[in-house]
Image (tube, grey):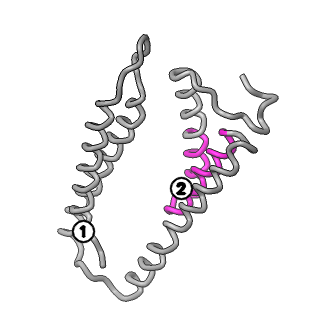
Amino acid sequence: MRIDDRFLGLILVGLGLAIYLTARTFPMMAGIPYGPGFFPSIAAAGLAVCGIIIAVTGTLKSRAAPAIGPGATVRSAARGALFRPLAIAVIVVFFGLALPVLGFHIAAFVTVAAAAFVFGAHPIVAPVLALAAAFGTHAMFYSVLRVPLPWGVLTPYAW
């Protein structure tokens, strides 16, 4: 059974809106311009934007292509539907186990690169994306939020 992309996109937008409204009810902390609802609000906005993109692309796809393709396409899509969620689960477990040992930078780089490869990123794009995501996330946590992340094996090079 396949769920229509337009419907799935609307569900994600609704879920993003619900998360955002719930995050706004979190209490603010004195003297800090952001509180515990800051990250859930960002995640909710990202979820809603992704839902809009999925709904719009689903609408464009439904106009451009027939609903049922050749058998090979259906079989390969079924294999991807089973492989990708399992691969992402393995990647998330790896991140959780590797974070204290390898540190945030290496664990995040490997995790983002692996996820990008799973979803079909070009072999040159995936490491560049992973490097930017790892250091961009570190910069936000370290400079803006003042939250230290584990350095692991890179502790001698910590700044």
For label 1, the crowd category at 10 Å Cα-Cα, with few meaning under 14, some 14 to 19 and many 20 or more, is some
> Where, quadrant-wise, is the C terminus in this rendering?
top right
**Residue in the image at 35% along x and 35% along y:** 41
Could you give the CA–CA distance between mark 2 and mark 1, rounded to whole angstroms? 24 Å
Question: In the image, is residue 116 part of the stretch drawn in magenta?
Answer: yes
**16 vs 78: above or below:** above
Give the image location of residue 69, x and y in percent: 31, 83
Disc 1 marks a residue whose amino acid type is Asp
Give the image location of residue 3, x and y in percent: 27, 70
Question: In the image, is residue 3 part of the stretch drawn in magenta?
Answer: no
Whether residue 56 is visible: no
Q: State the SS at label 1.
A: loop
**142 vs 119: above or below:** above
Whether residue 68 is visible: yes
**83 vs 125: above or below:** below
Overall secondary structure of the magenta stretch?
helix
21 and 150: which one is in front?
A: 21
118 and 85: which one is in front?
A: 85
- Highlighted range, magenta: 104-132
Q: Which residue is mark 1?
A: 4
8 and 22: which one is in front?
A: 22
Q: Which residue is mark 2?
A: 116
- Give residue 58's quadrant in the image: bottom left
Disc 2 marks a residue whose amino acid type is Ala
Mark closest to the chain's N terminus, 2 or 1: 1
User: Does 135 sit left or right of 50 as displayed?
Assistant: right
Q: State the SS at label 2.
A: helix
